[in-house]
Image: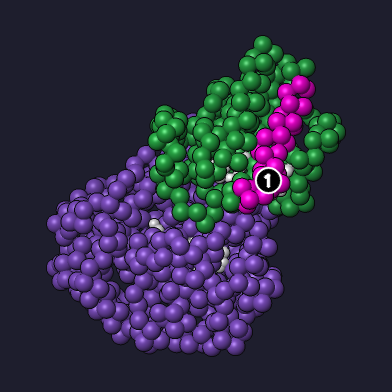
Chain colours: A purple, B green
């Protein structure tokens, strides 16, 4: 038994963890007991925990083939996006879609159908997936392609359709490892939304949003736009750099005491961050690592929130209700005085798939320490989300209840039904699927 | 690509430590030779090294216990490697080894006789060429015989002494020998054991330590230095006291 958790370190469970190194190992595990596959544990909550059998897929981390004509990479599910970048950025390729950390596995990116800063242009991870090989409850392996039921449920299915063994994904050709970034300071939520709408053609966009200020500046944000820099935009001496990631120079070596991050320190941080960000006008070059993965530079930053861990709230709201919904959410958050260090706002393009998270509109993500106040606040935020026709991101969730999910997302019941009919509900279960009745 | 870089041979190539080590050397552009009892199980590993690093990779059948085949094994390699890393090992089950000396023999031969034989063949060929590095993965278990694992430990002790002796003998020839004492490593061999995190290395760490040791011609490598002190203490415990412990 090993005590494991998701990235938020809440909840923690004693689980029997078995590492798979080959398809045979996976077949043995699937035949043995109900289980869930686990990638690199970057989902925040309990989606990759099963006390009886958690199958650690990091042992299946081989790249199998690459076709430079199409950019198609075939690899086992335990390969990290970090490895993909290390191997292919020097050859001029970058992942088509990447979440805010490069330490996720291919299997995890597929199971959560992750989104990046380019969702409004390129869609979610599924947009680059040509096929997925999934081991079902009876041990048979199916290669499934877009348009098929199994494919559609697997992308976003949170590991509940079977064990993903391999996949073929398409990479994006890039001329350099640099991003041209432009920051637009937005003094209010309305200004932030306007900035997103006015820049719908920017390939990447995301906003850091201040979720600790009340009043007229509530929701002030720095909207950051970016695109891959062409060779001629980069000074000659920098063109072929940086091809490797920065080393993690900072480490959070132990749990910080829970009071380190409180409404005052976080409020002060947010104010400072906004002022510094607002000063950087115009377009400037940022290396890929700092641009896409600012947090990866600090090892174990999840320890910043102390021993009890932290929670992440992420919802998506449809375009028509986004402004009203976000205003309501921010009002509740600031009124509760709950410190949120990292709050992110992002415009989504049209949603796809049977159970994937994104929907056309806006997504808000913020985190807070685990305590009763946070839990109460998050239940409040759930109500606001449901009232505005929004939905929740299961890759971040550790605490949603079944009734709320059903109310927010009628697709959940269809997914659960399909799982029962195909024998998957009995074989693939996680702490999350049990909590949510999937 | 691999212009001018010598090949690196991994013996026991399917082990987690060997896989990590192969990647570390392939990343530097060395051609890789993977040798194991079931080379057909390594086709994905070959694809991985080729896809990630673009180096040539070959697969070879190799059984450490079949010492009579070792000379022929060497002659079939595409080239005499510049570096050979032996990760072959077999822990067995101490209780079974105690109850059945025949089982103990398999542990002794797998950790000492077999690895010593293949490295001896390689040593002679490298000495004739006048260059090369041999890396033997031994174990801290060989530092002192203990009731809980002296069968495995004694074989590793023998292997450690063999490596020491070869290093001494080969010093004038330009061939270098590295002895690796990894301490606990999170691999298939130790899966399911409840190992203390601070004392347990990841296979990548072992691989990085081997790469550095080869480049800098280190003699003995303790992957996590704390192990050196732990074993010094265990060695220093007087026998009358030691006999009363459960180590
Ligand atoms: C700092 C940070 C930033 C993030 N930013 C974003 C972001 O911008 N956008 C976004 O979408 N997400 C984001 N995430 C969430 C993260 O991308 C997802 O949770 C992703 O699923 C994690 O992948 P993993 O390999 O760590 O999987 P795990 O966390 O181990 O597992 C996540 C889910 O995938 C399933 N799974 C994993 N491997 C397999 C497999 N081989 N077969 C079947 N199922 C499998 C698990 O069962 C589980 O349901 C972020 C997370 C962090 C920590
Ligand atoms: N894990 C630890 O904590 C630890 C600590 C100190 C030292 N070590 C040593 O580190 C080395 C690598 O071990 P590991 O932890 O990675 O465990 P492992 O996966 O069990 O590796 C042992 C390897 O030896 C191979 N092998 C065994 N007998 C063989 C034979 N007769 N011929 C050819 N190959 C043979 C096995 O190949 P098959 O796949 O064919 O069985 C396997 O690949 C071993 O020498 C081990 O003793 C391990």
Q: Can residue A90 be seen here?
A: no
Where is residue A200 drawn, in percent x and y?
42, 65
Say which quadrant the N terminus of chain B sits in: top right
Q: Nearer the viewer, residue A166 or B168?
A: B168
Q: Nearer the viewer, residue A46 or A342?
A: A46
Residue at horizontal 60 percent and vertical 88 percent from the top:
A421
Callout 1: chain: B
The secondary structure type at the circle numbered 1 is helix
For label 1, count other residues whose C-alpha is less than 10 Å away and answer few (under 14), some (14-19) or many (20+).
Answer: few
Determine which residue is flagged by label 1.
B101
In magenta segment, residue B142: no
What residue is rendered at 69% in x and 22% in y? B132
Residue at image location 58% in from the left, 80% down from the top:
A424
Q: Give the residues in magenta.
A: B96-125
Of the pair B53 and B233, the residue shown nearer to us: B233
Report x, y in % for residue A362.
Answer: 37, 71
Callout 1: CB less than 8 Å from ligand 2: no
Question: Along the horizontal axis of the image, is B185 left or right of B96?
Answer: left
- The image quadrant that residue B12 belongs to is top right
Q: Is residue A269 left or right of residue A223?
A: left
Q: Is residue B56 above or below residue A149?
A: above
Name the residue at 70% across, 26% down.
Answer: B82
Looking at the image, the residue that sits furthest to the top is: B172
Q: Position of residue A56 (x, y in %)?
A: 53, 60
Res. B224 visible in picture: yes
Q: Nearer the viewer, residue B15 or A154?
A: B15
């Amino acid at each position: 038994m090993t005590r494991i958790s998701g990235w938020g370190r809440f909840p923690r469970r004693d689980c029997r963890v078995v590492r798979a190194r080959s398809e045979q190992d996976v077949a043995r595990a699937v035949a043995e007991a109900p289980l869930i596959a686990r990638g690199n544990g970057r989902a925040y909550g309990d989606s990759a925990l099963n006390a009886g059998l958690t199958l650690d897929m990091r042992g299946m981390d081989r790249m199998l083939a690459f076709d430079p004509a199409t950019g198609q990479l075939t690899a086992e599910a335990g390969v990290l996006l970090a490895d993909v970048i290390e191997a292919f950025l020097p050859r001029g390729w970058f992942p088509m879609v990447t979440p805010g950390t490069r330490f996720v596995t291919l299997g995890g990116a597929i199971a959560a159908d992750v989104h990046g800063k380019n969702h409004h242009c390129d869609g979610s991870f599924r947009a680059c997936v040509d096929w997925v090989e999934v081991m079902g409850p009876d041990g048979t392996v199916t290669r499934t392609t877009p348009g098929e039921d199994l494919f559609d449920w697997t992308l976003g299915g949170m590991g509940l359709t079977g064990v993903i063994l391999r996949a073929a994904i398409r990479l994006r050709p890039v001329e350099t490892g640099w991003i041209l970034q432009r920051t637009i300071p937005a003094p209010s939520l309305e200004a932030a939304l306007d900035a997103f709408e006015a820049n719908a053609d920017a390939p990447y966009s995301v906003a850091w949003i201040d979720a600790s200020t009340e009043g007229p500046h509530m929701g002030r944000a720095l909207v950051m736009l970016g695109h891959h820099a062409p060779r001629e935009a980069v000074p000659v001496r920098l063109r072929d750099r940086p091809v490797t990631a920065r080393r993690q120079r900072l480490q959070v070596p132990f749990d910080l005491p829970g009071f380190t991050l409180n409404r005052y320190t976080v409020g002060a941080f947010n104010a400072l961050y906004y002022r510094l960000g607002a000063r950087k006008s115009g377009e400037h070059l940022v290396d890929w690592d700092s641009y896409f993965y600012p947090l990866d530079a600090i090892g174990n930053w999840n320890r910043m929130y102390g021993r009890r861990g932290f929670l992440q709230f992420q919802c998506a709201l449809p375009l028509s209700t986004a402004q009203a919904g976000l205003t309501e959410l921010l009002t509740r958050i600031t009124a509760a005085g709950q410190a949120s260090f990292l709050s992110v706002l992002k415009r989504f393009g049209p949603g796809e798939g049977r159970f994937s998270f994104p929907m056309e509109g806006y997504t808000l993500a913020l985190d807070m320490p685990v305590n009763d106040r946070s839990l109460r606040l998050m239940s409040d935020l759930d109500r606001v989300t449901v009232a505005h026709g929004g939905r929740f991101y299961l890759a971040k969730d550790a605490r949603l209840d079944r009734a709320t999910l059903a109310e927010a997302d009628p697709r959940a019941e269809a997914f659960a039904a399909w799982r029962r009919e195909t024998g998957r509900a009995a074989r693939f279960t996680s702490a999350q699927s049990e909590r949510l009745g999937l | 690509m691999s212009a001018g870089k010598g090949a690196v041979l991994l013996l026991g190539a399917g082990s987690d430590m060997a896989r990590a080590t192969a990647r570390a050397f392939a990343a530097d552009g060395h051609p890789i030779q993977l040798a194991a009892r079931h080379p057909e199980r390594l086709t994905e590993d070959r694809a991985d090294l080729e896809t990630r690093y673009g180096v040539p990779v070959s697969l070879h059948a190799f059984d450490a216990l079949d010492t009579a085949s070792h000379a022929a094994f060497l002659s079939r390699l595409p080239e005499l490697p510049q570096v050979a890393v032996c990760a072959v090992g077999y822990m067995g089950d101490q209780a079974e080894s105690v109850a059945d000396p025949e089982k103990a023999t398999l542990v002794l031969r797998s950790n000492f006789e077999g690895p010593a034989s293949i490295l001896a063949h390689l040593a002679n060929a490298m000495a004739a060429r006048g260059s090369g590095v041999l890396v033997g993965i031994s174990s801290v278990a060989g530092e002192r015989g203990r009731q809980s694992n002296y069968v495995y430990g004694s074989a590793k002790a023998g292997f450690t002494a063999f490596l020491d002796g070869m290093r001494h003998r080969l010093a004038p020839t330009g061939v270098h020998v590295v002895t690796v004492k990894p301490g606990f490593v999170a691999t298939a061999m130790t899966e399911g054991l409840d190992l203390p995190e601070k004392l347990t290395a990841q296979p990548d760490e072992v691989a990085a330590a081997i790469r550095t040791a080869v480049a800098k011609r280190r003699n003995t490598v303790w992957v996590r230095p704390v192990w050196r002190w732990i074993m010094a203490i265990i060695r220093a415990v007087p026998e009358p006291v030691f006999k009363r412990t459960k180590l």
